Amino acid sequence: MLKLFEHNTLNVKDISEEQTAVEVKNLNLWFGNKHVLNDISMRIPKNKITALIGQSGCGKSTLISCFNRLNDLYDGCKYNGEIIIDGRNINSRKVNVSRLRTNVGMVFQRPNPFPMSIYENVCYGLRLQGVKVRRHLDDAVEGALKQAALWDEVKDRLFESAQVLSGGQQQRLVIARALALKPDILLLDEPTSALDPLTTLFIEELMDVLKKQCTIVIVTHNMQQAARVSDYTAFFHQGRLIEYADSDTLFTMPEKKQTEDYITGRYG
Amino acid sequence: MVNRDIFGLNAVQRQSLVISLTAFFTSLLLIALVSVLILISFRGTAYFWPEPIYKVTGTLPDSSRFSVLANIFEDASEEDITLKYSDVNHPFGFQKQIDRKQLLSANLALESAEIKLLDGRRVMAIPEHIVVPSKPPQPLDNIGAVLQDVALITAQIEDLNTEHLAPIHEALSQFDKRDVVEDAPAREKLVAAFNEYQKRVEALENTRAQYRLLVSFADGSPFIIPISSIQDVDFVSRLTTFEKWQVVFSEIGVFLSDSPKQANTSGGVFPALFGTVLMVFLMTIIVTPFGVLAAIYLSEYAPNTALTTIIRVSVSNMAGVPSIVYGVFGLGFFVYTLGGSIDELLFSDTLPAPTMGSPGVFWAALTMAILTLPVVIVATEEGLRRVPDGLKAGSYALGATKVETIIRTVLPIASPGIMTGVILAIARAAGEVAPLMLVGAVKFAPTLPIDGEFPYLHLDRQFMHLGVLIYDGAFHSQTDGKSASMMFAACLLLLIVVFVLNILAVLLRTRLRKRYLKG
């Protein structure tokens, strides 16, 4: 029954507004004079895994950084168009960026745990929110680590430095750190490219569990990974959205020649 | 083809020539470092080592004979030796260089002692006996007991002075201020009490003066030393090696805890050590927040424009400005301008006598802070630059603002870099002399900048500094061997202070690094 439900992916054109987690409308973005994202429009469905694929420099990482306004950190970044999350245009100046980022978690390519204890890493976001009650923090840490399937491995050494964990454990810790804030959307920027195949598999299984609670957008260079884990896939080329469809369709019978070249090039 | 033959050597020979040249200069460097350390430690520790006393007889160039008790120092030249001696003309020590040929005899004088006085002077003489009031002369073995008796009397005198005379004096000055006729009887009573106590003090002082040590010099001429002025009597020529080490340690204790005496040629260096540490401590408190905040602005907030580049270059260049320039700036700006304005605003009742408008420990610390600011800024910026962008992005992605990211993530990771800057600043400030002499460090300060009197920390006071003490000692040393040793001992202490500070900071830095950075 569950299996059936999971395969019940809609055609991207039929995603209704209620089913949309992130709606991108005519998004353009420049770094200096370089036009990095060119008129992107797409609806990313709720509680699904959407993969963004394409060559390096095609703008897919930049696009997910738009979802939590992380591009604001870079000098010379300009953008227009709308990104609607929870019925609000987050590109508006009035948006509280800190609050937005607690709702839209992000995991980076290289595991980047803070040089603190495991416990403090998971608490980082909560402490910023002003949570001080020890019991609340304890509960949140345990919950987040359990969600990230790391609890059993670290429950006896929560107060040891996070630096001693292995790469895969660190990446799950970083996921737990984002989950502790209970985000609606989780952005994964090539989360497994620095990890070994077994750990990669572990994280992929984790994503499959997590999508029940939040919408996942993953950027990946690994075609097989995109095909394996994602419900929807979008192919980008030179800042343009070339093709966007449910993963089964996109990987088996792509509409565009460019998409086919890219996919088969990888396979071949 | 280019002829690459140099001096007709083949490739292997050329390579070994380069290697030996570079190795040669590296070893020169090592030799220079090691000889500095050896010279300073050897000459520095010699100050504490008790030299045996010899009875030296000889002839002077005018063929008259002399006979003195002396320490003998070998000179660099073979023909000469240096005598540091006491005789009836120079009881407190004098120094003379004589030709070896003039020397007739030099025998270890087992019966002679080095008598250290409380004012820092030393007498080399043969103790005869002790004169004690209303008792027959005492043998020398009783010196310990007699010293104790005298110390007891001194304590009584001190007691009378502080417990009775000083309060009465205070009360009298109060009466003088009020100047009322009704006070007259009470005043007279006080004056009577004052005179009574004064008489008792005088009596005690007279008794104390009767305790004397009779000594004689090599030619038999007698000399009298009041027991109350004696600190210690050592029969240095009789000491075993172990006892000599005991003397060394007690001397080191005196050196570290006592004030300089006899114009910084004997006694201890405690005020200078204290002044150095206090000045460096104040400087660290001032320079660390200034430097760190400036570095944070430059590295995290300043826009990447030409102006920022100019500021960065200027900061680096400021590290190369000669320190005396900072000294003059400190004197002209801090002391005269800033201090003068503070005096006019807050201490106008004591003008024209300056309060803050004269050199003092605070101005010295502020000047040193300006001098070391570039070091801290550059090192902190270096540390901030080492913080991985991924960590900052991770912090922002969890909803942290820029300030929160800097406080919670960037600064802890940059802390080893900040520590490095502070260490360099401390080492530089501890060793600096020239600018300090302009803004508050003096050869001799009668009081410490900290005492029991409100407000306890007197930032306007002048202070002593080890570097200035050494500078001062270097002038004395041209005429006096013993004060040269004091200079070397102070040098050794300064080296140790800087080494200890450095090692502490390096340990702290390693700990922080282990905690905040991957290996």
Image (cartoon, helix red, strand yellow):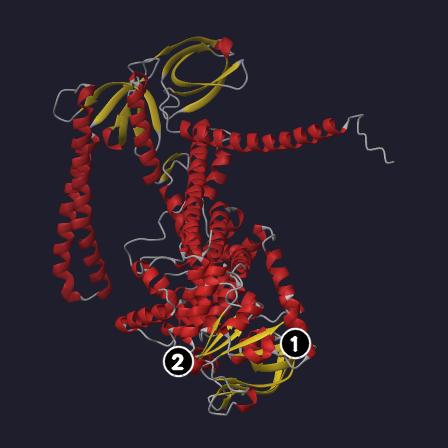
Q: Chain of mark 2?
A: A
**Residue, x 53% and y 62% (percent of image)?**
B333
Q: Which residue carries the number 2 mark?
A: A2
Question: Residue at the spot x=20%, y=30% of the render?
Answer: B147
Relative height, residue A140 to residue B229 (above, below): below
Q: Is residue B245 above or below residue A83?
A: above
The image quadrant of residue B233 is: top left
- Seen in the image, is B419 located left or right of residue B109? right
The chain holding disc 1 is: A
* Identity, as a three-letter code, of the amino acid under mark 2: Leu
For mark 2, give the secondary structure. helix
Q: Position of residue B27 (x, y in %)?
A: 59, 30
Depth check, mark 1 against mark 2: the one in front is 2
CA gap between label 1 and label 2 equals 31 Å
Tell me the quadrant of the picture where the N terminus of chain A can be found.
bottom left
Amino acid type, label 1: Thr
- Foreground of the two, A33 or A55: A55
Q: Secondary structure at mark 1?
A: helix
Kindly identify which residue carries mark 1.
A259
Residue A169 horizontal/vertical position (percent): 42, 61
Give the mark nearest the N terminus, 1 or 2. Answer: 2
